[in-house]
Amino acid sequence: MPKNKLIYLLMVLVAFIWGGTFNAAGFALTEFHPLTIALLRFAIATVILLLIGHREIFSTPVNKSDWLNFFLLGFTGIFAYNVFFLYAMKYTSAVNGSLITAVNPIVTAILATLLLKEKFTTRLAGGALLSFIGVVLVTSAGSWQTIRSFKFNFGDILILCSVISWSLYAIVGKTVSTSFSPLITTFYGFLTGTLILLPFGLFSKPGPAAIPSAGWPAIAAVLYLALIGSVLAFFWWNKGVATLGASRSSIFINLIPVATIIISFFFNEPITPVQIAGCVLVIGAVVLATGREPEAALQRNEGAGSFSHLPRQE
């Protein structure tokens, strides 16, 4: 399979994995505080990545100047995103959260254009718009009353902050990927994010002390979040950002509600024709936005900034 086609497949799988994290988080929340779950998730993931990639991690030189970028990775994508998102859901609805999160590709594209000078193409703009409309249909199930009932509240502001945090994570990740492999990028992002989460997760109630008495569904859910939703998905995501750029990668985020709908179908939950139409729109948007490599991106990949020429990349 050609390299880029494999990357597209991996990014689709990431969306499905993260779609499954919503169900997993529900099981974990029955036993643990949200910030404790976040701490356990990324602490376990950090240890697993260290065990898997210790040779590359210990043999890769890291300069003092690199630590600022690693800190920004951990702060934006691991700490800030989780805190904003988890607390937002106390004040807003899942529909509001999904609709606001759907602007992620647009926010990321704007930031990538301003900060990374990535080209904001017509195809990318069209894909972002189509995917947003698709997410609206998926999350509202075509109910005009649901759409009309949308009211902006404090929780929605927090959701928007989580969107910006994730967009910044993609931007920093793209910058770091010019010097480090996806493994190194993911590991140090997890490490710094875990250290920032540490005091919050430890002293939240119920905290890690609840582990011995926790049921197996909650334990299994935390392990899924750590091993599949973090180690595997974040590694593939960072690899995708390094290859496709921050703007084009962000389009795949809107596949998450589509993945959730498809997963729900296998659990015999009803799906409306409008939701199916929304799924088709989102999938079509991804195809539109990623169907052709932008000229600017090709030039970057061929130059000194591409990750393919780096000896540390695998």
Image (tube, rainbow, N blue to C red):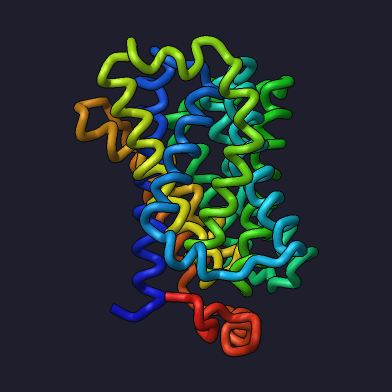
Residue occupying the point 45% across, 14% down: 209
Q: In this view, does 15 lie to the left or right of 306?
A: left
Q: Pinpoint residue 9: horizontal percent, then vertical percent.
A: 34, 63
On the rendered image, what quadrant is the C terminus found in?
bottom left
Between residue 281 and residue 77, name the one nearer to us: 77
Between residue 116 and residue 186, name the one nearer to us: 186
**Residue 249 visible at all:** yes
Residue occupying the point 51% across, 72% down: 243
Q: Quadrant of residue 210?
A: top left
Q: Is residue 242 depicted above or below 280 in this figure?
A: below
Q: Pinpoint residue 201: horizontal percent, then vertical percent.
A: 57, 23
**Residue 258 visible at all:** no
Residue occupying the point 53% across, 45% down: 133
Q: Pinpoint residue 218: horizontal percent, then vertical percent.
A: 33, 21
On the rendered image, what quadrant is the N terminus found in?
bottom left
Q: Pinpoint residue 242: horizontal percent, then vertical percent.
A: 55, 69
